[in-house]
Image (spheres, helix red, strand yellow):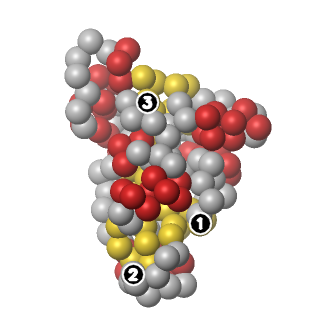
Amino acid sequence: MHLKVLEELIKNGVPYKEIKHADFTCEIKSPNDFAKVLKIDLARITKSVFLRIKNKDHFLMAVCSCKDKLDLPKLAILAGFGKLEIASKDKLNEIIGYPANGVCAIGVSVDVFMEESLLVYDRILTGAGVAGIEIEIDPKDLAKISHAQLANIIL
């Protein structure tokens, strides 16, 4: 787990469970593989998407189920900006410090928007700031410590 993520979890007293892909005998190449090995609904596994306001150096992050597709026009309106696009991996690394396959909304310095329907679950899984490790966490805790604005941000 990335040190920034761990520090935020500890500082805020948030209960969590760290799950390492390497602890399983089968290779995990996708969220589908992870859901199968854990025997959970794929909808409980989240993706955190680092976005850029088109033609500007302003960024934000959106969190939703990996089963869902973000509604970028709706999210742009919520954020009060024009068009959004996926930010480059270079910008992700430079601004957030997490790899593309380990993005997490915890410990970031940009605005975070989180899909409100995730709150129906007692626990969800999100990246841990490093590849191959996920955090199981209450979605309300994730929203709180990432200072996320809850909204309907999916198609």
Q: Amino acid at mark 2?
A: Lys
Report the Cα–Cα distance between label 3 and label 2.
Answer: 31 Å
Give the SS element for disc 2. Answer: loop
Distance from Cα at disc 1 to Cα at disc 2: 16 Å
Of residue 111 and residue 153, the one placed in the foreground of this image is: 111
Q: CA distance from mark 3 to mark 1?
A: 23 Å
- How many residues crowd around disc 1 within 10 Å: few (fewer than 14), some, or many (20 or more)? some
Q: Residue 145's spot in the image, x, y percent?
A: 67, 49
Q: Element under label 1?
A: strand
Residue 140 visible somewhere in the drawing: no
Choose the circle earlier in sequence order: 3 or 1: 1
Residue at 59% over, 66% down: 111
- Asked if residue 47 shows in the view, the reply is yes
Residue position for label 1: 111
Looking at marks 1 and 2 on the same chain, the residue that comes earlier in the sequence is marked by: 2
Disc 1 residue type (three-letter): Asp
Q: Residue tagged by mark 3?
A: 133
In the rendered view of the protein, which quadrant contains the C terminus? bottom left
Q: Which residue is mark 2?
A: 54
- Residue 52 placement (x, y as % from top left): 43, 72
